Amino acid sequence: MAFSPKFVARERGRVVVQPDSTLSTVAKSTVRFVVGDLHPLGVGSVSSGSPASVAAPAARLGTLAKFASAYGKPGETVAIKPRVRRFMLQAGAGDLLPKDRVALCLRRPIPGASSVDVLHSPAQQSAHYGGLMVCANLWACPVCAVKASERRRDELSGGIAAWDGQIIMVTLTLQHTLSDDSVTLVNDLQEGKRRLCSGRGYQGFKRVHGVAGTVVALECTYSFGNGFHPHQHILFFVSGLVDVDRFEDELRTMWPSAVAKVGRYASPKWGIHVTAASADVAAYVAKWGKEPKWTAAHEMAKASSKRGRGDSFSMWELLENYTVMGDQEAGDRFREYVQAFKGRSQLRYSKGLRALLGLAVEEKTDQEIVEEVVEDAVVLAQLDLAAWRVVLANDARAELLNIASSGDPAQIRSFLELLGVSLEVLPDG
Ligand SMILES: [Zn+2]
């Protein structure tokens, strides 16, 4: 899809762009100008220079209209770049959660910043922003989630490769209905798991089977017939060869009884799944946290049949149905899910396991991971705050990065000129 600007700066904004020949240094833009009544949605006049004046939820209606048309007609397959899709979903999440940091993520400059940087990593052949707030709400924000899960997936894969024992993957669920309160449901699931993995019985189980530690992944799906389906995948790292049948039999007794202690029911048959096949474990880890493969045709088909009571939706699919199709019920459920999961870890290592797997003992927080800087990044362009506002008003955050991925300042210049932002090339050195 060709990008066409919705709003062109009436008074031309300025951006400092690196000369094509050198990426070594960059000077601060000192240009100041007023965008005036650029924004048609009533945000009002914006003067540059103060970070506080850059309102977060810019042009949301515009976002939805733009992306709805980008999805094409039902039955059509339209290729949307993954980054554009992620930023689109993030805008939808910001609509649903206007008071959450996801509504400001990669929109609002960090306090005190006078510019927004477009950075490029030659090694990774990718571009990213500097000087913007990031939310680190991995349950709500597709942009932060993809970054954090990529890092954590790489780390876990490294740990698994370093482990010379066996790994058994166990999935735990409990019975639930549409009327369950989502917060209580997740609390009960996690408390059930805590009960399972504590006490004298579990110590004996660990000893017999040589369990060195666990990694627990918390996930959730939703169906309109049965409500939220939170579940946990546990990787048991065991040393030596384990009698898998016995391991499984014992867990099938232990899990329902742990769940009963928190007043819940788990079927010994359906409430637990065990696999020791290394291909299953590898496949699970390889796709953990990854976005599903997707085409618009697929989504349209899924949306139209979505009220099949048994159909299972990922949380990103709920968000997508809200963002693209305007499905309010899906949006309400997504908001409820974020509120129920906020603050919980997506992936948790048992005490001492990271050292055994050769990983840094001190695990990075979500915020630390999403704020990680790319070592070799160079500044391709610096946008002053008013120029950034023009990018926001055009919902062009993703497109600008896609163009910057080339590492070519001239392409950035052409793109921003399309938005009415004039450019100032820095003198060499
Ligand atoms: Zn974010």
Image (cartoon, helix red, strand yellow):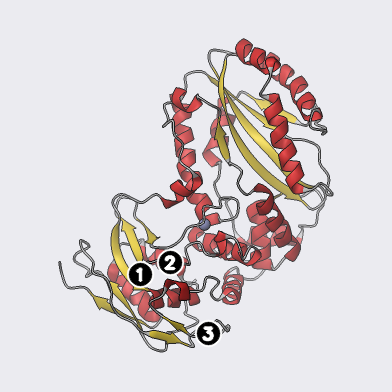
- Inter-mark Cα distance, 2 to 3: 19 Å
The residue under label 1 is which amino acid type?
Ser
In the image, taking residue 14 as reference, residue 218 lies left or right, namely: right
> Is residue 178 visible from the viewing direction of this image?
yes
* Residue 274 on image: x %, y %: 68, 26
- Inter-mark Cα distance, 1 to 3: 21 Å
Residue 332, label in figure: none
At mark 1, the secondary structure is strand
* Residue 170 on image: x %, y %: 66, 28
Residue farthest along the left direction in this orientation? 429
Residue wearing tag 1: 115
* Residue 200 on image: x %, y %: 68, 15
* Residue 89 on image: x %, y %: 58, 62
Q: Quadrant of residue 175?
A: top right
The residue under label 2 is which amino acid type?
Pro
Residue wearing tag 2: 109
Above or below, 288 against 373 in this view is: above
* Label 1 or label 3, whichever comes before in sequence order: 3
> Is residue 245 visible from the viewing direction of this image?
no
Give me the residue at 46% from left, 61% from top.
133
Above or below, 24 against 210 in this view is: below
Q: Quadrant of residue 287?
A: top right
Residue wearing tag 3: 44
Give the crowd class for mark 2: few <14, some 14-19, many >=20 residues within 10 Å: many
State yes or no: discs 1 and 2 in contact (Cβ < 8 Å).
Answer: yes
